[in-house]
Amino acid sequence: MTEPAYDIVIRGGRVATTSDVFEADVAISGETIAAIGRSLPSGKREIDARGKLVLPGGVDSHAHIEQLSAAGMMNADTFESATASAAFGGTTTVISFAAQHVGMVLPQVLADYHALAKKGAVIDYAFHMIIADPTKETLQNDLPALIKQGHGSIKIFMTYDRLKIDDEPLLDILVAARESGAMLCAHAENHGIIAWMVKRLLARGYTHPKFHAVSHARFSEADAFNRLIGMAALVDQPIMIFHVSTAEGAKVIRDARGEGLKVFAETCPQYLFLTAADLDKPGVDGAKWMCSPPPRTSADQEALWQALALGDLQTISSDHAPYRFDETGKLRAGPNPNFKVIANGLPGLEARLPLLFDAMVSKGRLGLEKFVELTATAPAKLYNLHPRKGSIAIGADADIAIWDPQREVTLSDEMMHDLTGYTPYAGRKLRGWPVTVLSRGRVIVADGKRSAEPGSGQFLARSGGEAAKPTGHLVADMDPARNFGATLL
């Protein structure tokens, strides 16, 4: 008897890429895709995908997992629970954070997060390095060494009392990223505006969670975007702007990209499907919908969808930041806290892809190819994980989600696999669901059950890649040919 040619053959599904949708078998040998075609030889295991879609596993490039906040609060998820929930939602790669706080030594921070992920992760992962203490040792010694070890992106905050990086150290970080070839990612909001609004709201007794949305005045986003883009252009460093929430913010990015600057940006489901009105709940229940920046208006949703269609925004991440609605999380400061002391963040790893599939594919907004691009291929390319991740292609890792496009699901708190205890999207009816998920050729979710063991995910070492390379076009202030010969970069 002839030995099976492949380990797994996925039969008769409709395969989707960023440019095409076609019927084909997909064959897997070991951990990688070995062949794509019609009537492929048999596999040791056959998966019937007739009537289903065969898509690349999602790449979620922005998730906070088992992360300690600057206030000393651990979020709700472990690496096992977070990555398991991601897998149930069709995501097979996640980039989370190794968060430095003031006084912490960056190499030890990375070692600690690696130990947590190695113990628990069930899908493959990488890290963004959060810099909150940009000392000379951090920028000149630790950061270059860690980037060489495969941590190709840095994140900074322009707001939050214990995390914000002011303009001068931000320029130092941008230059350090440039010199080592890393991408600089940013949470960009004007801290002074937010702090001023918070003080005035609280002084006048406006304490409920809904006033969190008011405190983050929408101008604070566009203003910070402009400042960040200007500083990045000064030193010719590509940047990624996280979680764009406003029409004005999207316009700032559109204008910068139109000028040829290497500015990339993402949004998140909370800005496409929620509004500030979702925070207007009895008592402190609105805390479940608190995140930063906050959800905005339906007009902003439309502007963000347009920005995605035009390519101004390149990816949609979850910004998974889970805090339970109890004394360990949202209610840590007591049963009736003011909005200033409530932990910001929403769970979203599991719901991201189903929400977007329903909107983009089932309801026809932007379409299947754009869904694949925004949720898998583009983030893999931007963060230098492609071609290994993000595509159905020969030689790529066999990270595959098989979707039943007709399956109807009503989201509920109980069905989520993270440890938050709720989803802000409970009650929403969706059409389309990932029914079988593979990671590097292993079936890790099937028939609603997980088979992947904790610690079976692998770390993905990467450089900053093409997206992080400077343009080579210096502004006059930094160009020796135009600044009296001063070499500043």
Image (cartoon, grey):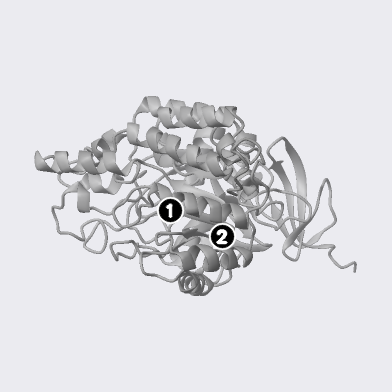
Q: Is residue 67 visible?
A: yes
Q: Earlier in the sequence, mark 2 or mark 1?
A: 1
Tell me residue 136's x, y (percent): 47, 65
Give the residue furthest to the left. 204
Residue behind mark 1: 169
Tell me residue 452's x, y (percent): 56, 68
Q: Is residue 232 left or right of residue 243?
A: right
Task: Give me the C-alpha separation between circle 2 and circle 1.
Answer: 45 Å
Q: Is residue 435 visible?
A: no
Q: Is residue 274 above or below residue 150?
A: above
Tell me residue 457's x, y (percent): 58, 67
Q: Residues within 10 Å of mark 1 (few under 14, many from 20)?
A: some
350 and 60: which one is in front?
Answer: 60
Q: Nearer the viewer, mark 2 or mark 1?
A: 1
Disc tally is 2
Q: Residue at x 63, y 42 (%)?
A: 485
- Label 1: element kind: helix
